[in-house]
Image: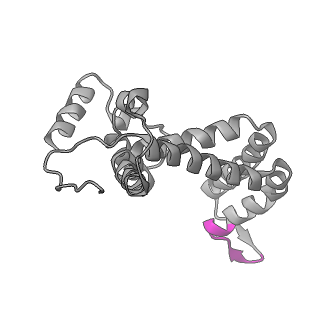
Amino acid sequence: MAAEKDQQKDAEAEGLSATTLLPKLIPSGAGREWLERRRATIRPWGPFLDQRRFSRPRNLGELCQRLVRNVEHYQSNYVFVFLGLILYCVVTSPMLLVALAVFFGACYILYQRTLQSKLVLFGREVSRAHQYAVAGGVSFPFFWLAGAGSAVFWVLGATLVVIGSHAALHHIEAVDGEELQMEPV
């Protein structure tokens, strides 16, 4: 814990704190705090990607142990791998980019209208959740045409394959104070 605080102080001294690196588009709140915690607990990418640390597990017990320990140890790294796969999927699909632009454009227009005055429809004030539901409804045909459903399943499948293979094949690092491990006979 003290080492993490020292690293954060060193980064802040260089002007590279997590708060300055986060995009300004992410509002303060639970999402921003969660992302800051993920960035603070990320493990170094060198050992994460070191090919010499990959080996085939000897048996099913070691495979399960590697999966559990590596997912716990590299959880933040895996989150960023997942986000990278989402970004790759969105960037390589032009129609999905159009659908996202329509959705965020509709949300922006609704946001700008509510800044001027509250949106009233048939004498009733429309809540923000209902406004975003309308934005989703307007952009739904674009997401349908873009194949957003298949993109979601592609991202989930690719994430399971990439993270699952890394967790299964990456050798577990020894930790001080680790419980006594018994070898299979």
Q: Residue at x 26, y 29 (%)?
A: 12
Q: Confirm whether residue 25 shows in the render.
A: no
| Rendered image quadrant of residue 84 | top right
Residue 112 lies left or right of residue 8; in this view the side is right
- Where is residue 109 shown, x and y percent of the image? 71, 50
Q: Is residue 129 above or below residue 173?
A: below
> 124 or 145, which lies in front?
145
> 116 or 12, which lies in front?
12
> 107 or 79, which lies in front?
79
Q: Quadrant of the C terminus?
A: bottom left
- Where is residue 36 shown, x and y percent of the image? 37, 45
The answer to whether residue 137 is magenta is no
> 175 or 36, which lies in front?
175
Q: Is residue 130 above or below residue 146?
A: below
The answer to whether residue 124 is magenta is yes
Q: Residue at x 63, y 70 (%)?
A: 127
Magenta part of the chain: 122-130
Residue 168 lies left or right of residue 173; in this view the side is right
Q: Is residue 60 above or below residue 39?
A: below
Residue 94 lies left or right of residue 74; in this view the side is right
- Where is residue 171 shown, x and y percent of the image? 36, 40
Q: Confirm whether residue 130 shows in the render.
A: yes
| Rendered image quadrant of residue 82 | top right
Q: Quadrant of the N terminus?
A: top left
Q: Residue at x 63, y 58 (%)?
A: 114
Q: Residue furthest bottom?
A: 123
Q: Is residue 129 above or below residue 101?
A: below
